[in-house]
Amino acid sequence: MRWPWSTRRNGQRLLLRRVGEQHAFVLTDGPPGHDQDQPARLLRWGLMSEAKPVTSGDAIALLDPADYQILKVDTPNVPPEELKAAARWQIKEMVDVDVAELTLDVMHVGGDVERAQRQLFVVAARNSAIKALTNGAAAISGNITIVDVWETALRNLLAAQARADDLAARACAAVHIDERHCLLVVSAGDELFYTRRLEGDPGLLARARGEQADAGAAELPLGFEYQPGGTFDASTTQESPLVVELQRSIDVWERSWPELPLARLYVITAEHGAEVATLIQRELGQRTVALNPLAAFAPDAPLPEGDSAEALGACLPLLGAALRTETRKL
């Protein structure tokens, strides 16, 4: 089974994931140019209720986060070609199933960054989930050659936005929020350095949508500058579990990578992204902005197919997977 950091020829690219009884899909004219000046063009995207064949040069299926784990271990002192086998032994006590039931792949934390003790991300996916995913997508594309995961897909969106904001060499974070998932990734120089799954916070999203009373302070300026507030009202002050976990994650990051201070936090969500970013910035004190996942593609993207209200949320991780350009081999 090939993973998203494997080499694959160019051509039209199809991205697929199962969403309930439907398939979310994204079809592009290929990966973005390696000079980053040639963004991929969206040809079709959205939701399909019936599995209809879509022709493409390659096809990438996206696993649901419930079907895999990303574990971090010290890099074993073995040749590169033996890393997977060594990692299989290292994670035996870290998973709740027999490792024989898992497909593994590995990538270095931070890519080729030099450290006294390097570490590996180990992606451990259930064989049964991979089989179900590829079998379910076979009616749409019989050529599923790559299985991707959300963390690397979100890393791609984050890296593209960081380049656009002239922050490519800095450490930036992105938190993806939907009704079922809340994933945090940190990258620098297009490499994944940190990832964590967080507890969601429906209350925070409701406040962003204006469904709960809020203090309504204006957006904070850059950095951590103090901004006077209005009259304090304890009834509107509520500690968000999401913000608490974000702060803990940032604290871990700063202790682990003091040479890479976090420059910016991006919010990736289908609706009310700007409002959610404003709330998080006010409560966290970290510069936070909404990320537009369509901005990484060529302009004039077509409207989504299927229910437009659901399509963007379902396709968000697929849009990140569509940006894969990685060809490095471990």
Image (tube, rainbow, N blue to C red):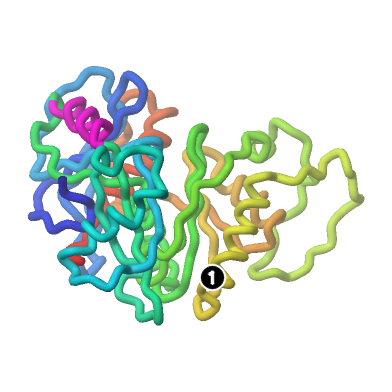
Asked if residue 25 can be seen in this view, the reply is: no
For the N terminus, the quadrant is: top left
Can you say whether 329 is above or below 151 in the image? below
Q: Residue shown at 53%/71% (left/top)?
A: 256
Name the residue nearer the viewer: 105 or 251: 105
Q: Position of residue 208 (x, y in %)?
A: 65, 40
Q: Position of residue 89 (x, y in %)?
A: 29, 55
Q: Which residue range is magenta in the image?
A: 127-138
**Residue in the picture at 51% in, 74% down:** 257
- Left or right: residue 176 versus residue 225 is left
Dividing the picture into quadrants, the one containing residue 328 is bottom left
In the rendered structure, which amino acid carries the disc numbered 1? Ala
Residue 135 lies in the magenta-colored region: yes
Q: Main secondary structure of the magenta part?
A: helix
Judge from the rendering whether residue 79 lies leftward or rightward of residue 230; answer left or right.
Answer: left
Rendering quarter of residue 246: bottom right
Q: Is residue 67 above or below residue 285?
A: above
Which residue carries the number 1 mark? 263
Q: Which residue is painted at 78% across and 36% down in the image?
A: 213
The answer to whether residue 195 is above or below residue 227 is above
